[in-house]
Amino acid sequence: MKPIHIYTACLLALLALCSLPAHTNAQSTKQDKQSAKEAAIKSLVDSQNYVFVAQSALPLSGRVRQLTSDYDLRVTKNSIISYLPYFGRAYQAPLDPTKGGIQFTSKDFDYTTTPGKKSGWTVQIKPKDYRDVQQMTLSISASGYGSLQVVSTNRQPISFNGYIKALKVKKS
């Protein structure tokens, strides 16, 4: 009877040893995927070639608004293209009523990137050729989620939550 117990104990020990590396491999695969995603986000921020897709707007006064249309901020080395809505108090009405949101293209701007507190980045954009927006601050997490704060000259500040993704190049 003793040989059966020894056989069972050896079999259980062998099974325990075999299951250990499988768990470690699954965990390292998850960490590898996370590291690859973080490297891709860092590459996008460094290359200045990405789109911030706004999913919700947080006006200074009022409630959070979930955005159902495609609103974004396109960032390239040569331009900033903003197509964002605005909710809040404006101190001066726009000359063109069709430009009610934060819609502009800037070819002359300052772009500064600094590492974030935990991980991620803080991007400061200051358009020089569009006077209504003083500054845009984009806080990007290592996983690609972001928060954009827009400070205007003639409006209350507004924030947007969303994510960044690669800018697709148009084929001519």
Image (spheres, rainbow, N blue to C red):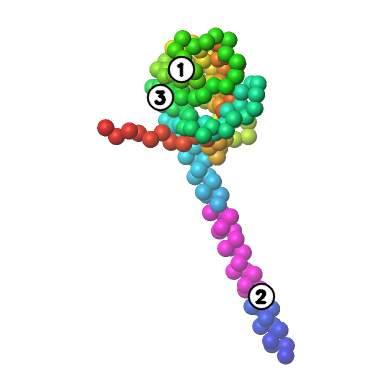
Residues under labels 1 and 2: Cα distance?
71 Å
**Quadrant where the C terminus lies?**
top left
* Between discs 1 and 2, the one toward the N terminus: 2
Q: Is residue 97 above or below residue 35?
A: above
Residue located beneath label 3 in the image:
77
Three-letter amino acid code at disc 1? Answer: Lys
* Rendered residue at 42%/15% (across/down): 108
Residue 170 showing in the rendered view:
yes
Label 3: few (<14), some (14–19) or many (≥20) C-alpha neighbours in 10 Å: few
Residue located beneath label 1 in the image:
99
- CB atoms at circles 2 and 3 under 8 Å apart? no
Q: Is residue 29 above or below residue 13?
A: above
Q: Is residue 49 above or below residue 109?
A: below
* Rendered residue at 59%/69% (across/down): 18
Choose top left, top right, bottom left or bottom right for residue 152.
Answer: top right
Q: Secondary structure at mark 1?
A: loop
Mark in the foreground, 3 or 1: 1
Give residue 135's position: percent from left, percent from top: 54, 17
Choose top left, top right, bottom left or bottom right for residue 145.
Answer: top right
What type of secondary structure mainly makes up the magenta span?
helix
Of residue 128 and residue 103, the one placed in the foreground of this image is 103
Residue at the right extreme, as displayed: 2
**Quadrant where the N terminus lies?**
bottom right
* Rendered residue at 44%/17% (across/down): 98
Count up the numbered dots.
Answer: 3
Residue located beneath label 2 in the image:
12
- CB atoms at circles 1 and 2 under 8 Å apart? no
Give residue 71's position: percent from left, percent from top: 48, 29
Q: Which residues are magenta?
A: 13-29
* Between discs 2 and 3, the one toward the N terminus: 2
Q: Secondary structure at mark 3?
A: loop
